[in-house]
Amino acid sequence: MPRALEIPRRSRVYVNRNLRLDKIETVGFDMDYTLAIYNQPRIEELSMRATLDKLCTIKGYPEEIRHLTYDAALAIRGLVVDRMNGNIFKPDRYGFPGRARHGLADLERDRVASLYQRERMRLSTQRYAWIDSLFALPEAVLYAGLVDYLDRTPLASKPDYPTLWDDVRQCIDLAHRDGSIKEVVQKRLGDFIDRDSHLAETLHKLRSSGKRLFLLTNSAWDYTNPVMSHLLDGYLAAYPSWRNYFDVVIVSAQKPEFFTAEHPFVDLDGEGAPLARPSEGPFVKGRVYAGGNLKAFEERARVGGDKVLFVGDHIYGDMLRSRKSSSWRTAMIVQELESEISTMDALRPRLAALDQLDAKLIQLDADLNERQQAMRALQRLDIDAAERGPESPDLQAARRTVKADIDRLRAALKQTHAEHRAAERETDLAFNPHWGPIFREGYEISKFGEQVDAYACVYTSRVSNFRFYSPMQYFRGPRDRMPHERF
């Protein structure tokens, strides 16, 4: 087993809060985007095409929209859709919009300020929609493309921006419900889902340490079974079926309602059909359950609280709701972490230069402030001297010197700001040409980064990264410090 610093950075588990795996008795997993890592470009393109078809055939949109191109760079996790104005923006940790776009065009800073700085924003209202999962990225890309198309295309009648968003949401949901997307994926699982050769080994390692495992997915049985078979069957002789890895299998869980409502558990037969008998008593290994709720799960599994670790990918459905409704510990799968860390490592000299520019700006601001204070002091002396008689040559010379210093510092500050903006733009382009890195927005952590910090005890890029660590690992979080405590 490698030491922590020997593990490649892109494969490490990162810690927000202390987590002792030796205290964890049961580990649960979401399926989509957690155990099953999708090929994002392919699944997003498929989702967009299926949704465009629904918009044309059901909502009556022009056939021309079928030719819209899919640009994966148009959306990242952590964006917010302003349904009222047809805009998409990226908020920082305080909810303040940094970058913003209308359709396919960037919004100028002055326009962003006029829209979003004049009054307190409430991002929880219906006006705004969050793009907080990989599942939702095609919605944002499609909305941006359609806003651009409708703005520049003369039509007899057009939906307004809120209606357009509602139509996109309804049609993409329908495409998932009626099998338009999942049937294609099931026929070509190898094209759409990466088969992680280390996943089986990781699950076996957890089980061998005495931990019980459960699957908790919103997908129905008819989709869960082939996907999980694709991921796990045939790897280890001790597990002839993927179901042998799990003590409890729950499908159609309806998260986040699983954590907040009281839906009953339903026993399913081998074909996924509900059985007539009531679902009650302790869970039986080998059976499949649908629906359910947190309270009943803990009673029937005979485990709960901080002895459960749940691994998922969705901020709201997996992390936030489980943290707020229970004492479960949480591990978040952030698939994008691999590319983000690889980009950061490649940009280390550039990021170091950016840090130096930050320090230079701070120093220039301090120097300019000191010189301006000196000028104000000289001006007061000038007023006093004028009452006594002619201004002394020494005072005139001192004022000229300080003014020259102020002019020089202002010029340096302007130049350094320009260098900083250019370096920041160059750095952002390496992550995403429109939105930059997902964990930062300007000087601040992004809202997405803040949510990962708030609701995930640990986070990593894929489940199989846990194989690098002992099942008894003590993940120690960094000591948190206030700004005045930092040296």
Image: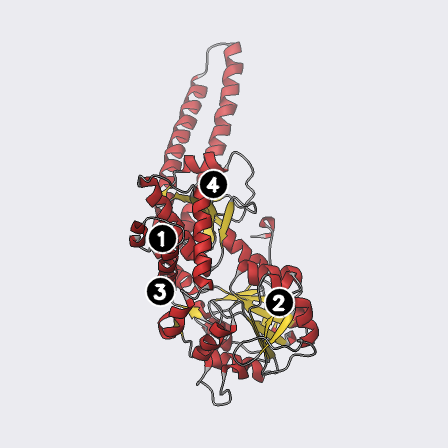
Classify mark 2: helix, strand or loop.
Answer: strand
Measured as percent of width and height from the top left, residue 30 is found at 53, 69
User: Is 411 located above or below residue 338 in the figure?
Assistant: above
Judged by depth in the image, the label closer to the viewer, 4 or 2, is 4
**What numbered label is drawn on residue 329?**
2
Mark nearer the viewer, 3 or 2: 3
Q: Are marks 4 and 2 in contact (CB under 8 Å)?
A: no
Q: SS class of the residue under badge 3?
A: helix
In depth, the one of 286 and 22 nearer the eye is 286
Residue that mark 4 sits on: 84
Q: Is residue 15 above or below residue 428?
A: below
Residue 263 x/y as whole percent = 64, 65
At label 1, which amino acid type do we have?
Cys
Q: Earlier in the sequence, mark 1 or mark 2?
A: 1
In the picture of the structure, the residue carrying the numbered disc 3 is 42
What separation in Å lies between label 1 and label 3 (alpha carbons)?
Answer: 21 Å
Residue picked out by circle 1:
56
Q: Earlier in the sequence, mark 3 or mark 4?
A: 3
Q: Kindly report the distance in space between the C-alpha atoms of the residues bearing marks 3 and 4.
A: 30 Å
Q: Amino acid at mark 3?
A: Arg
* Disc on the earlier residue, 3 or 2: 3
Label 4 vs 1, first from the N-terminus: 1
